[in-house]
Every structure is written in structure tokens, then in C-alpha cells.
Image (cartoon, coloured by chain):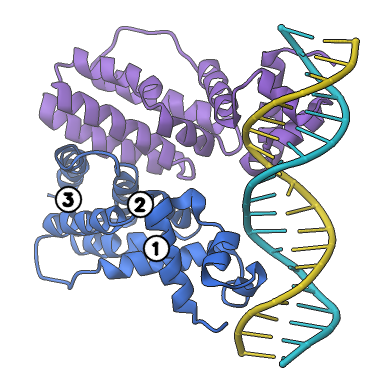
Chain colours: A blue, B purple, C cyan, D yellow
DNA sequence: ACCTGAACACCGTTCAAGT
DNA sequence: ACCTGAACACCGTTCAAGT
């Protein structure tokens, strides 16, 4: 048997979409790939590393090119993009939230730079980016109108402090 | 061996505080209580039911009496109370968030009634309560000043729509 | 009613040994 | 370098049988 690291991630995403995060075990994945469980540890130091690689793949698929626009419009767009990337996969929000607990920087970074360009101080940048990311991650189940309203609440608060 | 349902919950909270949510297994808990694993299933239908009972206990310990005050001050106080209850226990936010995924009503209800008294419509009540609860649950790690700012952002948005 | 004993069907992870 | 085989140390849950 021979396979690449990226094959493991690709197959893992298929398992995720078809059966959910609970079914995504190292043993099952190894079985699907026709390999012994221990073999996966040659490509990933542990399960968290595999989940991080999956999250990375899911998020990079949903990347959009940077455009020049107002800071609040950019934040809005970034949040919608993150939401879309999550929602393309079963348990996407659950997976991203789990990975985000040990590495919050990656997801928050684009939001931070938009807030900094808007003239936000260190605290408002930190709290604004974190609040928006967690809002997206925790509203996977909400419909689009409810999500837009929730996002609007936070953006209003930011506008009141940055206008 | 003889013990009550409440003994199981009490001991579970001790395990939680001392060793974290990962260490809180049915088997370990049974061992601590000097009982076979299967015995716990006479008091709780499954592990989720036990976790729900623990969450219930943690939240009821942090209950405060209702007072007459402005709706935004009440929302602020309810969120602080929820945050305090969570933070009294190791992995408190993680536990509550997990239980909240299958039963969101219980936590949101007090916030909903405050928003309704403020004259919010059905959508704003629903989204406002959900956003605030999830904000609290996702900011366990933030310090008090950052949390207050994050809460202020959302409350500003609500005020802009309810003033 | 409440618990034991024992099983069933799983996990993540490690590691000597093979190729 | 990459994988197998086999083990270690765990899980949640069920259920006949005992008291």
C-alpha cells in the first residue's frame, strides 16, 4: 500500500461528509485506506494534527481574493466566506471550532488586519476578530437571515466605536 | 453499595474540577464511586443525560434572584451570571456548550424574556438571545475587560434596534 | 429496585520488526 | 521511508443473573 499525506486528508473529508465527525476515527480511516491504524502516525503525529490538516484544507478551498473595500464590508464578506466554507461539510463548524481552540490565530488573522486598517486599537482588534469568528462558528444551524442579523449586531457595535 | 442520583452528579463535578472533562468517563466515575460501570445506567439513560444533569446543577448554583431594572442592564447581568457559573468549574464552558447543542432553550430563556419585555420582535429575540449565550460560552478564556468589550459590542447593536 | 459480571463493539497510540 | 502485527490502555453500552 502506498499513499500520500494529501490522500489521507481527502479521504478524511469524504468520511466526514458522508458519516459526520463522530465517525472520523483513525482506525476507520485506516480501514478505508486499506492500511493498518499505526501507519497513519507516519504522516500525522496524532489525531489533532490530522484534524488541523482537514480544517486547513476546508478553509483554503473557500478562500477569496482580496479586494479594496470599506472595512465593515470586508468584515462582512470575510464572515460570509468563513460561514460558506464551514457549511460545505457535515459538522464543518464543529471541526473548525475544535481546531480553533488550540490555534485561534489562523482564522482571526484576516479579520484583525481589516480592523487594524479601520483604525481599531489593540483591544478592539483582538476582541472584534475573536467575537466575529466565534459568532460564525456558533451559528452553523441558524438560517441566513438570522445569521445576517447576528452579524449586524456585532458590526453595529464596531461601527459605534470606529466611526 | 448504595448511592443516590445526586451523589453521582456531585462526584462527577469533583472529577471535572480535579481532572477536566476528558477524564470524566462513565467507567472512571463508576470506579470512583466503587461500583460497576453498568450500574450508572440505572440512574442515567446515557452519558449525555449525565452531562445534562451536571450542567443543570452548575447553572442552578449560579442563579440570582430577579430584580426590576432596565432591559440592557438585565441582559448584562444575566450574561455575567452565566459566565461566573461556567468559570467556577474546569472546562465549564466546554461542558455547557456541549449540553447546549442539544438543548438550547434552557440557557436562552431568561435572555429571551428580557428582550421581549424590551419590545423586541420574534427574530431579534431569537437571534439576540442566541448570540449572547454563544458569546459567553465562547469567551471562557478571555479576561474580564475583553469579555466586557465583546458583550458591549452586541448590546450596542441591540440598543440601536430597540432604542 | 439496584447492582454485579461479563461481554460487545469500539477507541488513540506505540513500537519492534519487516520491506 | 513506509508499513505490518500486535499489543497497551482505555472507551460507552447492554443485559442476564443475582440480592
Q: Residue at x 64, y 67 (%)?
A: A37
Q: Is residue A22 above or below residue B87?
A: below
Q: Residue at x 64, y 44 (%)?
A: B22
Q: Residue at x 75, y 36 (%)?
A: B28
Q: Is residue A49 left or right of residue C14?
A: left
Q: CA distance from mark 2 to mark 1?
A: 10 Å
Q: What's the chain of the residue with tag 2? A: A
Place residue B30 in its image quadrant. top right
Residue receiving disc 2: A90
Place residue B5 in its image quadrant. top right
Residue receiving disc 1: A14
Q: Is residue C17 above or below residue B23?
A: below
**SS for callout 2:** loop
Labels 3 and 1 share a subunit: yes
Residue receiving disc 3: A162
Residue B112: image location, x then y, percent = 27, 19
Amino acid at each position: 500500500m502506498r499513499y500520500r499525506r494529501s490522500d489521507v486528508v481527502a479521504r478524511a473529508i469524504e468520511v466526514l461528509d458522508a458519516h459526520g465527525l463522530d465517525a472520523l476515527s483513525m482506525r476507520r480511516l485506516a480501514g478505508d485506506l486499506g492500511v493498518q491504524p499505526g501507519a497513519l502516525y507516519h504522516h500525522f503525529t496524532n489525531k489533532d494534527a490530522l484534524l488541523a490538516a482537514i480544517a486547513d484544507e476546508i478553509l483554503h478551498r473557500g478562500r477569496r481574493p482580496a479586494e479594496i473595500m470599506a472595512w465593515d464590508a470586508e468584515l462582512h464578506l470575510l464572515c460570509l466566506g468563513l460561514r460558506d466554507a464551514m457549511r460545505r461539510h457535515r459538522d464543518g463548524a464543529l471541526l473548525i471550532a475544535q481546531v480553533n481552540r488550540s490555534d485561534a490565530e489562523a482564522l482571526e488573522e484576516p479579520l484583525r488586519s481589516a480592523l487594524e486598517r479601520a483604525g481599531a486599537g489593540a483591544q478592539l482588534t483582538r476582541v472584534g476578530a475573536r467575537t466575529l469568528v466565534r459568532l460564525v462558528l456558533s451559528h452553523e444551524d441558524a438560517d441566513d437571515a438570522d445569521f445576517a442579523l447576528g452579524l449586524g449586531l456585532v458590526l453595529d457595535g464596531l461601527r459605534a466605536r470606529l466611526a
